[in-house]
Image: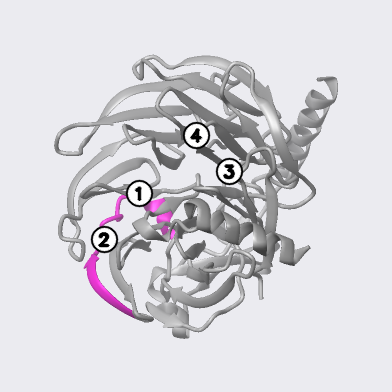
């Protein structure tokens, strides 16, 4: 069994090297990232503010801009064109001007009852943004609310000044989210990972799931999928989307 | 659907019951006590592997996985062989709840400061610090226990950075979340 996986990996590496993404020095972040290095700039979130530092000189960041976004901002995502800030009240989209300074384009409110503010990381490609909204009744959770909202929202962002909610999918308790090509990876908090084909964003097809364990955040890395639980790292090979394979389960607690 | 609202109602009822009689003078209560950074934890340092809890942000820069442990630092996992990852180091950064990487540099929040560390060839050096960059972002200080309702021991900044909270029985607590 283990031998089989190892042979499979070798075959992969020799074909396209897709499990070895070390060549580029590429930095990939989970969906709860609050800090991203993009070009010569460093973008990061305070509690309610989007800060920008210049890192042209990598060892000496220079603060160049700070702007208020909203309260309770949680996540930062970049789709190679726009910055997405996930907050408990909505999805904020910024373009970057020639100096790399974020320019506000839109906020899309999630429009729930007052005070029902779900937790909500975002992933996006050029055309669509995906946001997982979640709440729980479990006390002690940062997402404890009195009404339960657990869903995936899909937005058409071809006009970033006016995103359109084109699909909503009920989920169990969606948390971390990741995107790679036509694949969307969603953590179900206490119930594992789900993989969707998003070729038709109005009709997502689940092509894989692995359930029954804690899954908080996810990083798809060119064929290698990292899933973080509370105490474990789960890894999968998704080079062949018809045959997603679990590679390992690593206990990291001790 | 009905069940969903019933659960919501029960949760709301629990909150109402929980918050009754705010005028009561409390001499003793179960609540949260801040844990201040101490010893090795109170400074930036590269240490051997250690136990891990409270997942924060994650970053992958092949072949390494970097895991933020909220308010304590960053665990480094060598993932050269995805079949057999190995935890190799811990970078202690008190008050760190956010970080990213660029080449050899680690950019991180440490309490109110923005810091830059150079991490290469298994050595760590602080190369830059912007003191009080986040002074206006008070929540980064963990002055209030996160995601918690009730009494807590007030934070004394002179004791250092708060790296976590622990539940304890408090005598005459003066601070309470609202």
- Of label 1 and label 3, which has the lower sequence position? 1
- Cα separation between marks 1 and 3: 17 Å
Q: Which mark is residue A36?
A: 1
Q: Which mark is residue B132?
A: 2
Q: Secondary structure at mark 1?
A: strand
Q: Position of residue A130 (x, y in %)?
A: 52, 29
Look at discs 4 and 2 and give the one toward the viewer.
Answer: 4
Inspect the magenta stretch and tell me whether residue B140 lies in it: yes
The chain that hosts pointer 2 is: B
Residue at 81% in and 31% down: B7
Which residue is under mark 3? A176
- Cα separation between marks 2 and 1: 20 Å
Q: Are marks 1 and 4 on the same chain?
A: yes
Range of the magenta residues? Answer: B124-141
Q: Is residue B125 above or below residue A135?
A: below
Q: Is residue A4 above or below residue A65?
A: below
Q: Residues within 10 Å of mark 1 (few under 14, many from 20)?
A: many
Q: Secondary structure at mark 4?
A: loop
Q: Are marks 4 and 2 in contact (CB under 8 Å)?
A: no
Q: Which mark is residue A181?
A: 4
Q: Residues within 10 Å of mark 2 (few under 14, many from 20)?
A: few
């Amino acid at each position: 069994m283990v031998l089989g996986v190892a042979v499979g990996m070798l075959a992969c590496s020799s074909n396209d090297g897709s499990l070895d993404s070390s060549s580029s020095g590429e930095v990939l972040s989970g969906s709860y990232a609050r800090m991203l290095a993009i070009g010569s700039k460093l973008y990061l979130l305070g509690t309610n503010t989007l800060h920008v530092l210049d890192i042209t000189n990598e060892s000496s960041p220079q603060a160049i801009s700070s702007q208020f976004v909203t309260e309770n901002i949680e996540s930062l995502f970049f789709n190679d064109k726009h910055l997405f800030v996930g907050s408990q009240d909505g999805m904020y989209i910024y373009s970057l001007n020639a100096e790399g300074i974020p320019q506000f384009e839109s906020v899309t409110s999630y429009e729930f009852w007052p005070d029902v503010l779900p937790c909500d990381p975002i992933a996006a490609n050029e055309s669509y943004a995906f946001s997982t909204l979640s709440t729980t009744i479990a006390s002690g959770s940062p997402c404890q609310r009195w009404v339960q909202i657990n869903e995936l929202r899909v937005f058409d962002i071809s006009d970033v000044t006016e995103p359109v909610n084109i699909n909503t999918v009920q989920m169990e308790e969606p948390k971390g989210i990741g995107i790679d090509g036509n694949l969307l990876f969603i953590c179900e908090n206490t119930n594992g990972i789900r993989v969707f084909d998003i070729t038709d964003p109005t009709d997502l097809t689940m092509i894989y799931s692995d359930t029954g364990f804690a899954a908080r955040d996810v990083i798809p890395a060119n064929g290698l999928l990292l899933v973080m639980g509370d105490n474990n790292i789960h890894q999968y090979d998704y080079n062949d989307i018809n045959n997603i394979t679990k590679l390992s389960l690593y206990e990291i607690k001790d | 659907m009905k069940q969903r609202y019933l659960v919501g109602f029960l949760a709301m009822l629990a909150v109402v019951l929980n918050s009754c009689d705010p005028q009561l003078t409390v001499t003793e209560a179960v609540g949260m006590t801040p844990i201040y950074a101490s010893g090795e934890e109170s400074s930036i340092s590269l240490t051997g592997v250690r136990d891990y809890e409270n997942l924060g942000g994650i970053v992958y820069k092949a072949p390494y996985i970097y895991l933020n442990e909220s308010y304590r630092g960053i665990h480094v996992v060598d993932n050269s062989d995805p079949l057999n990852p190995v935890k190799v180091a811990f970078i202690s950064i008190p008050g760190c709840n956010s970080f990213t990487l660029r080449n050899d540099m680690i950019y991180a929040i440490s309490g109110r400061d923005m810091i830059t560390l150079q991490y290469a060839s298994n050595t760590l050096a602080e190369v830059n610090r912007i003191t009080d960059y986040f002074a206006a972002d008070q929540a980064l200080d963990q002055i209030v226990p996160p995601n918690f309702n009730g009494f807590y021991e007030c934070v004394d900044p002179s004791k250092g950075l708060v790296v976590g909270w622990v539940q304890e029985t408090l005598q005459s607590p003066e601070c309470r979340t609202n």
